[in-house]
Each structure stands twice: as structure tokens, then as C-alpha cells.
Amino acid sequence: MLGIVASAGPARVAAMPERTCIGCRATDDQAALVRLVAVDGQIVLGTNPRLPGRGAYFHEGCVGLVVRRRALARAFGGLPASAELQELLRTVDG
Ligand SMILES: [Zn+2]
């Protein structure tokens, strides 16, 4: 039998890894953020969460901030963006 239907206390959300958006600098659930990873000397969209390497995270809607703040250069030390990522950045860059 299920004893509890709804608890009055604050819900304990299961531990979700939090990451900082390099655009707006807010922290959010990793699942809500797009991951970038440095692979083979370039920055790629980390569609595979198990990709090894240095990562950075941003909200999809914060792409403009990422570009304006040159957050990629700061996070990855000037590594070039992959063609796919450049495409994404170009959608907001001018
Ligand atoms: Zn953000």
C-alpha cells in the first residue's frame, strides 16, 4: 500500500550535477545546458556526455552571451571552434 500521496515538505530533488553557464554565469542542471568539449585541439559540441576532456557548458539561449563575452576563448584558451560549433555561433554573431 502506498502510504504517502504528497508530502508537505520541500521536495528533495535527486542530486543533479550542476554546471555553470559560461554565457550568463548562472548554475543549472547539467541536463539543461549544452556541453562543449576540447577534442583534438578544437572545441566541439559535446553531444556525447561521455566524451573525455575539458568541458564547458552553456544554455542554448545564451549563445549570444558566449560570443559577446568571448567566453570560449576564456574557457578553452583560444582553441578554434569546430565547423559545427562555428555554425552555431554564427547564428548569433552579427
Ligand atoms: Zn546561461
Image: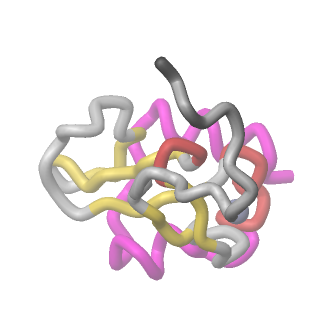
The answer to which of 26 and 79 lies nearer the viewer is 26
Dividing the image into four equal quarters, which quarter contains ligand 1? bottom right
Q: Residue at x 63, y 37 (%)?
A: 88
Q: How many marks?
A: 0
Q: Is residue 25 left or right of residue 94?
A: left
- Whole-percent x, y for residue 77 in the image: 34, 78
Q: Residue at x 35, y 71 (%)?
A: 76
Q: Is residue 51 left or right of residue 57?
A: left
Q: Residue at x 28, y 38 (%)?
A: 49
Name, please, the residue furthest toward the top.
1
Tell me the magenta residue range.
67-94
Is residue 22 visible in the rendered structure shown here?
Answer: yes
Quadrant hosting residue 87: top right
- Whole-percent x, y for residue 59 in the image: 66, 52
Q: Is residue 40 left or right of residue 83?
A: left
Is residue 67 visible in the rendered structure shown here?
Answer: no
Say above or below: 74 vs 66: below
- Whole-percent x, y for residue 80 in the image: 38, 57
- Whole-percent x, y for residue 82 in the image: 39, 41
Q: Residue at x 56, y 74 (%)?
A: 71
- Can residue 88 be found in the magenta stretch? yes
The answer to which of 90 and 57 lies nearer the viewer is 57
- Can residue 93 be found in the magenta stretch? yes
Q: How is the image coloured?
A: secondary structure
Name, please, the residue furthest toward the right.
94
Say above or below: 47 vs 64: above
